[in-house]
Amino acid sequence: MAGAGRLLAADFAISLMWVVSNELIKIFSLGYAASQLEGDILKCALSVANLFAFAYMSKATDGGAYNPLSVLAPAISADFSNFLFTVGARIPAQVVGSVYGVKLIMSTFPWIEHKPHLKVDIATGALTEDLTGGCMNPAPVMGWAFANKQHITKEHLIVYWLAPVEATLIAVWLCGILFGTKKDKPSAVKKATSPPQKSEKSD
């Protein structure tokens, strides 16, 4: 139980820091670059460094994550209790962390206004998100949508939640068909490497 609590705290904190760090990168790259090209290069370099930093934090916290899809995929293939813990606790902790991250950004930099803008119809947007993972992380989108009171709109729920989750389920299903499940491989290896048992002769 204590380990589960630490993991939830890590999910919350890492999700909050992910939202804040990405906005700080945008502010820094736009404010200190002399040209658009320099700004893009600086933003790219800082984003890559940011990914490495969060990968280290994930390892240091034994699996803390900021993306609901990255924890949903392995949970689908795990046991039912792990799936319930992920859907009922870990993903909500990530969403709440993202919401507080957005609130921190908006209180610190009140001139910032950021929210997802869908420039096509909902069906096209959902298909694009399903196939390409255009946003890939619904938690920060939820944070900004909540701040703008758009978190229960049909556009937000279908495009930024339903479509990515469906794509994750399809990807897990395809991987299971192409590569098999993890539960099958250890048993096969164990069966192949186990030494033959010698039959005992009765006197």
Image (tube, rainbow, N blue to C red):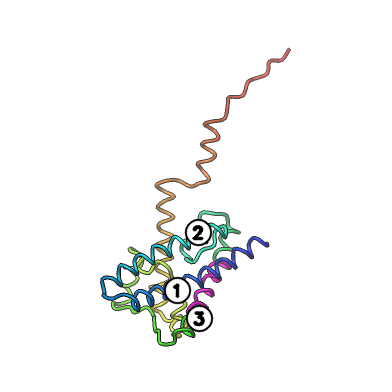
Contact between labelled residues 3 and 2, with CB atoms less than 8 Å apart:
no
Helix, strand or loop: magenta stretch = helix
Residue linked to disc 1 = 140
Q: Amino acid at mark 3?
A: Leu
Whichever of callouts 2 and 3 sits on the residue coming sooner in the sequence is 2
Label 1 near label 2: C-beta < 8 Å? Answer: no
Q: Secondary structure at mark 3?
A: helix
Looking at the rendering, the stretch of residues picked out in magenta corresponds to 88-102
Q: Which mark lies nearer to you, 2 or 1?
A: 2
Q: CA distance from mark 2 to mark 1?
A: 20 Å
Indicate the position of residue 9 as horizontal and vertical percent values: 60, 68
**Could you tell me residue 144's position as x and y percent?**
44, 79
Residue at horizontal 34 percent and vertical 76 percent from the top: 32
User: How far separated are the C-alphas under marks 3 and 1?
Assistant: 13 Å
Q: Which residue is mark 3?
A: 104
Instruction: Name the foreground residue: 202 vs 180.
Output: 180
Residue carrying label 2: 56
Residue at the location (54% across, 59% down)? 63
Asked if residue 196 is positioned above or below residue 115 in the image, the reply reads above
Q: Which mark is residue 189?
A: none
For the N terminus, the quadrant is bottom right
**Mark 2 residue type:** Tyr
Q: Residues within 10 Å of mark 3 (few under 14, many from 20)?
A: some
